[in-house]
Amino acid sequence: MSKILLLQAVVAFSSVAVSNCFIWSSTKRSPGLLMSAGQNESKQTFFASLEQSLRSLGSTYKTNRVVDDFNEGTFKAVPLFGRLRDVTTQPTTIDAMTFNSFPDLPLGPLLLLNGEDFVYKGQSAPHAAASPNLYAVQTPFRISKPELKLAQKSGDGSWIPTSGVCTVIGTFEPSEDGKQLTISLERVELTLCDESNNAHKFDPRQFTAPFIGSHEVLLMTPEFTAVKGNFGSIFLLFPVNK
């Protein structure tokens, strides 16, 4: 059954690629030009159709709910549309990544390293905080203009970090019918490093109050999961062997 779903989804995703080439081609050729209102409307219409297709598949085959075995481990998240995609495709700041937990770090603009970020879920996740309800997002980044100086561990001299890894950690809780996950983000971990293997791991910083979000499960199979976030983002989660 999952093979049939995968085949049907591949057909839908191949249409996504064709649509993206058409809709975003003018933006790629002329970065300074804004997408026209008509193109933006076409993109929204297309992804609304894609969401409906995924929702229909999940409902038809009763795969629009959490399956524990498919919901644990390491995943690669691929945002297709919405706020999450916008956030991950442009420079960000340490304040945005850590919910203002490190106001004392003037790192400047940060570039996310797409393809190297992972989501860890559940007891089987290869993460130090692994638990039945673990939900953690690990995001590596590069510092655009490295200037911050950190003292050497030996106490002699200093070094300038050029990259880092931010991990936001919390828990997830399935709804009674299994069709939604409530995400509670509780703390953040941060490590800065350079090309000479210098590294500094900061003490974890607990949020004053948890940041609550949710994932509506549109389709969950062994090969991938499609969800819709509480801000309207649609993204896919692919299991990764780590």
Image: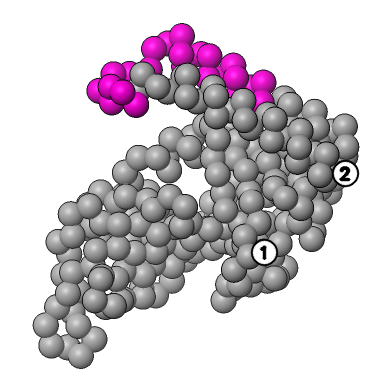
Quarter of the view holding residue 227: top right
Q: Residue 90, percent across and down?
A: 35, 40
Query: Does residue 138 lie above or below 56 as drawn?
Result: below
- Tell me which amino acid carries mark 1: Gly
- Residue 199 visible, this angle: yes
Query: With 162 as the anchor, is 3 left or right in this view?
Result: right
- Tell me which amino acid carries mark 2: Met
Question: What residue would you read off at disc 2?
Answer: 1
Residue at coordinates 14% horizontally, 78% vertically from top-left? Answer: 158
Quarter of the view holding residue 180: top right
Closer to us: 208 or 65: 65
Q: Residue 212, percent across and down?
A: 58, 49
Closer to us: 52 or 28: 28
Closer to us: 180 or 163: 163
Q: Is residue 121 magenta?
A: no
User: What crowding class fits label 1: few (fewer than 14 Cα within 10 Å), some (14-19), or many (20 or more)?
Assistant: many
**Magenta-colored span:** 28-50
Discs 2, 1 touching: Cβ within 8 Å: no
Q: Which colouring convention does the figure follow?
A: one colour
Q: Main secondary structure of the magenta part?
A: helix
Quarter of the view holding residue 152: bottom left
Residue at coordinates 43% horizontally, 35% vertically from top-left? Answer: 86
Question: What residue would you read off at disc 1?
Answer: 73
The C terminus appears in which quarter of the rendering? Answer: bottom right
